Amino acid sequence: MKKYFQFDELGTTYRREVIGGLTTFLSMAYILFVNPTTLSMSSIPDLPAEMRMDPGAVFTATAIAAAIGSLLMGLLAKYPIALAPGMGLNAFFSFTVVLTMGVPWQTALSGVLVSGLIFTLLTLSGLREKIINSIPAELKFAVGAGIGLFITFIGFQNAGIIVNNDATLVGLGDLSNPQTLLAIFGVVLTIILMVRGVKGGIFYGMLITAIIGMFFNQIDVPDKIVGSIPSLAPTFGQAFMNLDQIFTIQMLVVILTFLFVDFFDTAGTLVAVANQAGLMKENKLPRGGKALFADSAATVVGSILGTSTTTSYIESSAGVAAGARSGFASVVTAVLFLLALFFSPLLGVITPAVTAPALIIVGILMVSSLGKIDWERFEIAVPAFLIIITMPLAYSIATGIAIGFIFYPITMALKGRAKEIHPIMYGLFVVFVLYFIFIL
């Protein structure tokens, strides 16, 4: 096992990988509850029942899709990157495709299935890997830093430290709110553990924060340990039932959006986490094709089970920060998602106040890549900065990448360095411009 996952080469141990896999799971366990809530649109009153997906079935589909995707990533690509139905894409699925466009959720699942199959073909052809490897190193560093700011922003929001403000868009939240105070406690505690060099400090910070939350009645103590597994019957196989409904301009736009967002969110996540773990080799992603195949295959499986697009999770960076370096950590995360099917009542203690500190601290770790960007070269500084700043402000990893990749060939050409630009980067320039014109 150690030899297969290259423990000696990566300087890791079973303990580090288990703690890393567990930390990743805890950081993304919220999706087990957020995804069913989103896809069932429980926050929207007075919707016809046929527009809502069954939340129990979505819960089970979410856990199984995450387990299969993470297992494939761990065993095939050997990366410490976990997968699950993506945030943002699930909201697009429900509130744009189903609610606004009026597309039945069954047909929307067919769209997810087709996008996953297209992704698989692109991956097997090697095109996806070539695109990622053609991206300049400094733009990859910018992507990592931008994602760091983005997840820190999400952490601040989840903690209630930063809230909506109609006058200034965002502002400081109510710091006297007990949930916010609990999150702040978690941030301070985790910082102390990290500064003191405690291995797995992020994980222990989350664990202690959850215990403190229960002690002060800010987190409900589970009334039972084991719960029954909801049936998949309401959603399983529905993606096959409406394939004949996807041949419309409307569904073509939907499928292209699924493709676009998943492609570049995944690319950004793989590059950022691989950089953080020190796994990039000469600006290339070793076994990148296998990592991308795991991602696309998970989307296909997830759509058949009954959930929106499954993608690589940036929360994996929390596991890397806790020590994970190999695919064994992803295998651990996969097993925990399967166990979550049986112990779902215990997951109620993993609240936003518990996960927010991990996201904030990981963001601090990820922006270290800023130092690897040559800010003295303005033709590089412009696209790099736009990537970094747009991700949190537009609330989208893909949008940040798109804007930066549009400006890169422009600034490089104006500097007289057009011949240094990889042909694929010119192709991406055209793709992103067309995306903003016709799709966004």
Image (cartoon, rainbow, N blue to C red):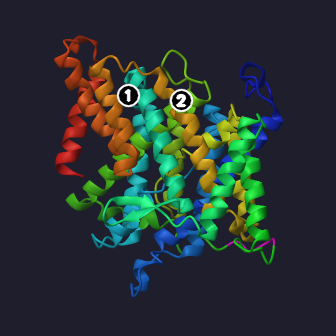
- In the rendered structure, the answer to whether residue 23 lies left or right of residue 31 reads right
Assign the N terminus to one quadrant of the image. top right
Give the alpha-carbon distance from disc 1 to disc 2, as whole Å: 24 Å
Q: At 34% from the left edge and 17% from the top edge, which residue is drawn? A: 376
- x, y percent for residue 30: 60, 61
Question: Can residue 177 be seen in this snapshot?
Answer: yes
10 Å crowding of disc 1: few (<14), some (14-19), many (20+): some
Residue at image point 69% right, 32% down: 326
> Which is more N-terminal, label 2 or label 1?
1
Vertical relation: 224 (above or below) 128: below
Residue nearest the viewer, comparing 344 with 357: 357
The local secondary structure at tag 2 comes to helix
Residue 351 seen anywhere in this rendered image of the structure: no
> Residue 131 shows which numbered tag?
1
| Image: magenta residue range | 225-229
Q: Is residue 99 left or right of residue 196?
A: left
Q: Residue at x 73, y 47 (%)?
A: 203
Which element type, helix, strand or loop, lies under badge 1? helix
Q: Nearer the viewer, residue 331 or 401?
A: 401
Main SS of the magenta part reads: loop
Whether residue 177 sits left or right of residue 191 in the image: it is left
Residue 241, picture quadrant:
bottom left
Residue 368 badge: 2
Residue 127 belongs to the span the image colors magenta: no
Residue type (three-letter) at the residue carrying disc 2: Ser
Horizontal and vertical percent for residue 9? 73, 19
Residue 421, given in percent of the width and then of the height, sits at: 28, 17
